[in-house]
Image: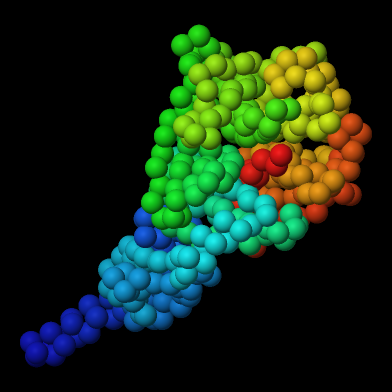
Amino acid sequence: MWPVSLLLIFGVSYLLLNQFNKETTYVIQQVDENGALLKPQTYRSGHVWRNVNYKTNISGYQLTNTSEKLPQRFGFTNETVKLTYQVKNKQQAKNQVKNAKYLGAGYAILTANTVDGFQQDDPNGRINNLRLATSNDGVNWKMVSANYPENYVRDPTPIRIKNKLVVLYTGGILTTTDLNKWTNTAYDFDNSRLKLQYVVSPDMFYDANESLNIVFAATPLNKTNSHLYVTSFSKKRINTGKQVHKITGLKMAASLSDPHIEYNNGNYYLWALNTKNQHLEYYKSTQPYSGYRKLKSVNSLAVNMLGPSVLKVKNQYRLTFNMLNSAEATVSVPYTIKVNNLNKMKVTAKHMQGLEIPTQINSIGYEPQK
């Protein structure tokens, strides 16, 4: 018969062996000082006492002194570890935004896995955070290290107004003076007559009088088709005007979204997505919200688009968009196509180039150019 002490030794050894063979999981959340995710939530699994092997470095940021520490080895229990980062040089980030010739904004999908260059946007728990980028030539872009708002952001468009940075997005108007503290304001236009459900893909443009306007898509209550609308924008109030105009014209697609308007030499040029087939529709008018006629329907790319926007660089225009994989409802890295003549826009796959931006962001909106 086995001595009791020996049985205890075997029993304890067996339990310890089971524990050390057990696989535990660490959920790693890397956030800025506002609590906004900087990278997608990461999972690391391993046997007890094995090395975690996870690089915590994020360009432009450093771990705060009060941040949780990521264990070097896996323990006996599953854990969620939140790593908090601060901007390395806040003044440098402010100067980067202040002095840049071109300013862009997009959103990062932080609840997605990337497969073959595409990101899956999880509709059940999506987190899409604001990202800012600057450029001095309109070609090469640099990301802005900031404490971003912890808001769900889609389709943002930025503008600098005196000492403020203003970002329009689907949920409202974000404002900051220091890239740290943000305020969120609702759109102030009169919706009593139109009864629009919500603002989608807001964009800004200057009209013939160099007044600032917003163009956006929206679906009226109890309707299914999305239409385009224009309203004024006050730099003093940092909000919209009260009156909203529906965009009208000949041969307008039944349902449009993701609009962009560019004024040039007495004409307004409108780009928008046909929501029925994701093709790009292109229109022209002498008025900002009426009299549009179709110039082209772009379906020659053999790809579907998301978030088209246009940046004027000297005498050239750069059409930027993300390629949409409709079968998987996913988006890819942004692409750009040079447009030399607004009246004879040529958009073909052979002219597509990857946008020179150091991270994967979607629906890039540009600060409007006069």
For the residue pair 225 and 264, the one nearer the viewer reads as 264
Q: What residue do we see at 77% from left, 44% from top?
A: 312
The image shows residue 23 at horizontal and vertical percentages of: 36, 70
Q: What residue do we see at 55% from left, 62% from top?
A: 95
Name the quadrant containing residue 251.
Answer: top right
Q: Looking at the image, is 35 positioned above or below residue 164? A: below
The way the protein has been coloured in the rendering is rainbow
Q: Is residue 15 visible?
A: yes
Q: What residue do we see at 36% from left, 79% from top?
A: 73
Quarter of the picture containing the N terminus is bottom left
> What is the residue that sits farthest to the top in this orientation?
193
The image shows residue 108 at horizontal and vertical percentages of: 55, 51
For the residue pair 250 and 75, the one nearer the viewer reads as 250
Q: Looking at the image, is 200 positioned above or below residue 4? A: above
Q: What residue do we see at 81% from left, 33% from top?
A: 264
Name the quadrant containing residue 85.
Answer: bottom left
Q: Looking at the image, is 86 positioned above or below residue 177? A: below
Q: Is residue 330 left or right of residue 240?
A: right
Quarter of the picture containing the C terminus is top right
The image shows residue 5 at horizontal and vertical percentages of: 9, 90
Q: Is residue 210 left or right of residue 64?
A: right
The image shows residue 231 at horizontal and vertical percentages of: 59, 23
For the residue pair 318 and 23, the one nearer the viewer reads as 318
What is the tally of numbered marks visible in this picture? 0
Q: Is residue 1 visible?
A: no
